[in-house]
Image (cartoon, coloured by chain):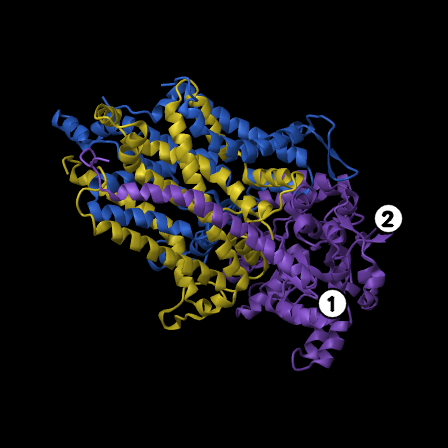
Chain colours: A blue, B yellow, C purple
């Protein structure tokens, strides 16, 4: 494979690697370095006095609880999205005919051309006290008074997040289902396995890469989100991005960079652990017999 | 289909699919309805009130239209570059042996950096190197944002490329390049298209990085954000509705195009 | 190129070639021209004596800048800065804002900080003749000057209190309404410590006689007092939500999510435009005064547009801008030139309306007003407490 000439992998790697180093690693280095600098009360900027004050401040005022609750929201939303996206992907790939397949794909993509800012805002109009949902519930006689918890609650935030990021789970799942030959599933059924058994023992393992990708995408998007929480959460609801903005507003840049570094390290650590357990690298490899 | 899901299971699967679609479609459809409401307060119009006044007012909104143009240009270029680079990265991934995991982690690392920090830090890097802010700097930021997603999407689509195909092709005398062009590329085409669409949409809707990296001309999300904070007339709903309708038209066109000609063997299933 | 081992359509081949070509040529070409476009327009703008105005979106007058340009000989290019001081200051200190913009319009209080960082330079008041017409109390706003130099020119001032629905609550004249347990779940405050802490402090100082010296600049112990009070009410479910941005504010009132909330006066005007019955309270505890001030960015000096910038600011105080802003949003530029201009051009702006707005704001400021300051002495402690409030 690798003769006396340059290995082809190095040639292929170069453009993306350069982009990542220049636009990704360089800023990241700045962020990590600056997170160890101190805030300078004279200039309201930062000075190169090394200190862990930024990191220590994460333990104060309950900031770390925001990081934890963000990760929990991300995990929950990703799981919920997978639970909805998996059957959707199955339906689109296995159940729908050729034409319906394409129509459904189109349907899933289209809403993402509109701004998620306005989409999140419209959930306020739908879930509010005078919104459609409450109006229908009243008209149907199910509720006498408007339900307050529909909006400005965790319920609303989760709905907003799922509505914003569901296709991020659907697409990778669909792509990974493409490699599954339906004859495998049919064969399992011929051998006596029920539908669910053949699903879990054959389809699930084969689409693991799609499941991982879908989960990761939604997870990352939620951690980086802010509009859903700001528009739909209750009084002062917080999430990491909002906290970073809050902190930057008071010029506490070392703290802001420290928070980002910690979030980065935690998520990256989770991916590393996942790799150890699931062998992520092998997910994308050809597993045909 | 060969698989017998059973009627109950089939209904369950379709029910969940439809529930998912309802959840994603509720906001844009509601907004579409709102955009036809001539009243200043956003709400569903009664059937007698339908009006196009906000759509008529759109061309006069220079800030919005200019921002839309800028966003479309940036999104297109980002999508092209991200798809291209991610394809290279994916190919490199499969060429590597021992360093495969390290390369994978390197490429997806930028995904985990919060947008506001990436935007600020990258703009600091540019300023220190005397690079002026413009659409190029926004593209740089969006490229790093979209690449990990495109990379993973393309990787996932490589699942359709069986090693046996490549081996068979090699036996028949195909060079690496021919194998790539004739076998791999067509098989991963849905992945490439998905990666392109993903990157395009990620860039089109991205706000925080664009805020820090943009030049004088803001992108659409930044302008929309500003308008929502400073008194927007319902023109923003018309803008949103217009984009929605335009994207329905585009996607419908592509869908129709792929449904009708080439009704013979196209993609592998 | 034999075709027998090609299982797929020949179209694929040309697709690939086309795609690669596009990537190399087209993308690069578009990228260059896209980058070049903004560059070229910047150069062109320089020739026409234009200034880049980077301010809160509420200061924009849209198409009327053309008229402004004709009158003053300077063409402003307006860009929205998002109003959030955090990203704005970050972009000035570490980012590209100084390369792009000439004049900033920011919430008052950060002038000291920006001056110390050297990202803004002082105004030469001698080059702004209209400055004389600015009302004295606006000139006296404390944070405009630093080290004896004028860093901020007041452009918009107003005094904030409570937006409420008289049809539901009758007449409201105290911030106590916001903390009234009878209104649990039907009130809101802004998601910004800078305003909400001041309102609460004003209430505690005036109506509950707590030992608070200056609600705009709380000491550590005073801050603790105020925030504990807020935290208690939040845990009791007093607030429906904290709002963040104009459209959100109007929507809360219009859709009956809240009956009363602290906020900006234009929300009342907007609400009325939309057919709602809303009033702005005149609380006994007083108003929260704020100013949006013009600062001269260092980049403007470097690029030699400083004189154009002075002409621009002079124009802002000239009367036309004040009339337009007052009519569009109900915001006031603190100068008598507005009325003068309206009287000279009665077909454009009704002099009575302009005068009424002026008197209205002056009356507010004649009473009890506590100034908003983006940078109180303990500003970092404010953020810490606000974080505790979020977690409560």
Q: Is residue C251 left or right of residue A40?
A: left
Q: Which residue is at 14% across, 35% downward?
A: B2
User: Residue C340 at what x, y percent from top left?
Assistant: 76, 77
Q: C172 or C351: which is nearer to us? A: C351
Q: C73 or B198: which is nearer to us? A: C73
Foreground: disc 1 or disc 2: 1
Q: Is residue A59 at least partly visible in the picture?
A: yes
| Secondary structure category for the residue under label 1 | helix
In the picture of the structure, the residue carrying the numbered disc 1 is C315
Q: What is the residue that sits farthest to the left in this orientation?
A: A190
Figure quadrant of residue B6: top left
Q: Which residue is at 59% across, 59% downward?
A: B230
Relative to B187, say whether B93 is above or below.
above
User: Residue B188 at what x, y percent from top left?
Assistant: 31, 36
Figure quadrant of residue C258: bottom right
Q: Chain of mark 2?
A: C
* Distance from the alpha carbon under mark 1 to that under mark 2: 26 Å
Q: C201 or B39: which is nearer to us? A: B39
| Secondary structure category for the residue under label 2 | loop
Figure quadrant of residue A166: top left
Q: Is residue C235 left or right of residue C195?
A: left
Q: Chain of mark 1?
A: C
Q: Which mark, by number, is residue B193?
A: none
Q: B105 or C148: which is nearer to us? A: B105
Q: Is residue B41 left or right of residue A64?
A: left
Where is the N terminus of chain A found, in terms of image quarters?
A: top left
Q: Which mark, by number, is residue C147?
A: 2
Q: Is residue C162 at least partly visible in the picture?
A: no
Nearer the N terminus, badge 1 or badge 2? 2
């Amino acid at each position: 494979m690798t003769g006396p000439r340059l290995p082809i992998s190095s040639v292929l790697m170069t453009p993306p690697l350069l982009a990542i180093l220049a636009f990704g690693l360089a800023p990241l280095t700045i962020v990590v370095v600056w997170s160890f600098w101190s805030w300078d009360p004279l200039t309201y900027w930062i000075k190169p006095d090394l200190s862990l004050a930024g990191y220590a401040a994460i333990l104060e005022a309950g900031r770390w609880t925001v990081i934890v609750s963000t990760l929990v929201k991300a995990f929950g939303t990703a799981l919920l999205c997978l639970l909805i996206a998996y059957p959707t992907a199955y339906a689109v790939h296995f159940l729908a005919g050729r034409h319906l397949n394409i129509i459904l794909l189109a349907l899933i993509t289209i809403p993402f051309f509109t701004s998620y800012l306005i989409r999140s805002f419209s959930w306020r109009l739908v879930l509010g006290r005078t919104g459609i949902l409450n109006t229908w519930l009243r008209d149907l006689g199910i509720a006498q008074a408007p339900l307050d918890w529909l909006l400005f609650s965790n319920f609303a935030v989760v709905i907003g997040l799922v509505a914003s990021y569901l296709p991020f789970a659907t697409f990778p799942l669909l792509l990974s289902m493409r490699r599954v030959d339906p004859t495998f599933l049919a064969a399992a059924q011929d051998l006596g396995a029920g539908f669910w058994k053949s699903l879990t023992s054959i389809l699930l393992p084969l689409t693991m890469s799609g499941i991982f990708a879908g989960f990761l995408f939604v997870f990352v998007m939620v951690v980086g989100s802010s509009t859903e929480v700001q528009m739909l959460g209750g009084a002062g609801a917080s999430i990491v991005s909002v906290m970073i903005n809050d902190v930057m507003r008071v010029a506490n840049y070392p703290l802001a960079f420290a928070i980002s570094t910690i979030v980065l390290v935690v998520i990256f650590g989770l991916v590393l652990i996942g790799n150890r357990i699931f062998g992520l690298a092998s997910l994308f490899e050809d597993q045909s017999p | 289909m060969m698989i017998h899901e059973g009627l109950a299971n089939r209904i369950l699967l379709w029910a969940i699919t439809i529930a998912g679609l309802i959840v994603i479609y509720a906001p844009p459809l509601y907004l579409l309805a709102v955009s036809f409401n001539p009243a200043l307060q956003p709400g569903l119009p009664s059937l007698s009130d339908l009006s196009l006044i906000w759509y008529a007012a759109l061309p006069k909104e220079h800030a919005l239209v200019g921002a839309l143009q800028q966003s479309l240009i940036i999104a297109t270029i980002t999508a092209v570059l991200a798809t291209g680079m991610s394809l290279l990265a994916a190919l490199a991934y499969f060429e590597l042996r021992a360093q495969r995991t390290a390369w994978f982690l390197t490429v997806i690392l930028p995904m985990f950096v919060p947008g506001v920090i990436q935007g600020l830090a990258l703009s600091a890097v540019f300023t220190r190197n005397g690079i002026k802010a413009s659409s190029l700097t926004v593209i740089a930021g969006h490229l790093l944002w979209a690449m990990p997603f495109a990379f993973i999407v393309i990787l996932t689509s490589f699942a359709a490329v069986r090693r046996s195909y490549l081996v068979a092709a090699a036996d028949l005398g195909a060079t690496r390049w021919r194998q790539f062009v004739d076998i791999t590329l067509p098989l991963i085409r849905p992945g490439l298209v998905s990666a392109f669409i993903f990157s395009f949409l990620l860039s089109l809707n991205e706000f925080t990085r664009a805020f820090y990296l943009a030049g004088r001309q803001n992108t659409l999300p930044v302008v929309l954000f500003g308008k929502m904070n400073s008194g927007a007339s319902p023109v923003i709903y018309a803008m949103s509705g217009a984009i929605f309708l335009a994207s329905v038209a585009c996607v419908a066109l592509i869908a129709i195009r792929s449904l009708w000609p080439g009704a013979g063997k196209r993609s592998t299933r | 190129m034999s075709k027998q081992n090609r299982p797929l359509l020949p179209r694929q081949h040309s697709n690939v070639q086309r795609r690669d070509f596009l990537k190399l040529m087209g993308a690069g070409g578009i990228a260059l021209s896209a980058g070049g476009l903004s560059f070229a327009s910047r150069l062109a703008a320089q020739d026409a004596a234009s200034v880049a105005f980077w301010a809160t979106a509420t200061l924009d007058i849209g198409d009327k800048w053309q008229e402004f340009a004709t009158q003053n000989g300077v063409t402003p290019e307006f860009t929205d800065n998002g109003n959030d001081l955090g990203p704005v200051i970050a972009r000035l200190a570490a980012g590209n804002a100084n390369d792009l913009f000439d004049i900033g319009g920011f919430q008052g209080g950060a002038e000291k900080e920006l001056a110390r960082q050297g990202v803004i330079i002082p105004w030469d008041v001698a080059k702004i003749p209209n400055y004389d017409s600015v009302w004295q109390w606006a000139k006296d706003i404390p944070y405009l000057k630093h080290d004896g130099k004028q860093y901020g020119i007041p452009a918009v001032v107003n005094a904030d209190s409570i937006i409420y629905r008289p049809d539901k609550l009758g007449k409201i004249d105290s911030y106590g309404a916001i903390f009234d347990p009878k209104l649990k779940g039907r009130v809101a405050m802004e998601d910004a410590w800078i305003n909400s802490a001041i309102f609460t402090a004003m209430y505690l100082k005036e109506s509950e006689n707590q030992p608070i010296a200056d609600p705009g600049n709380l000491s550590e112990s005073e801050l603790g007092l105020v925030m504990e009070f807020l935290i208690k009410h939040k845990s009791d479910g007093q607030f429906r939500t904290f709002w963040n941005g104009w459209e959100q504010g109007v929507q809360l009132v219009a859709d009956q999510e809240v009956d009363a909330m602290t906020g900006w006066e234009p929300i009342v005007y907007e609400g009325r435009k939309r057919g709602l019955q809303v009033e702005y309270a005149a609380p006994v505890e007083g108003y929260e005064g704020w100013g949006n001030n013009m600062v001269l960015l260092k980049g403007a000096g470097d690029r030699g547009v400083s004189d154009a910038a002075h002409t621009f600011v002079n124009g802002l105080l000239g009367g036309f801008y004040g009339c337009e802003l007052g009519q569009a949003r109900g915001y006031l530029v603190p100068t008598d030139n507005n009325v003068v201009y309206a009287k000279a051009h009665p077909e454009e702006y009704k002099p009575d309306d302009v005068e009424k707005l002026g008197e209205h704001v002056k009356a507010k400021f004649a009473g009890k007003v506590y100034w908003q300051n983006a940078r109180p002495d303990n500003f970092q402690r404010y953020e810490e407490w606000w974080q505790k409030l979020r977690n409560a």
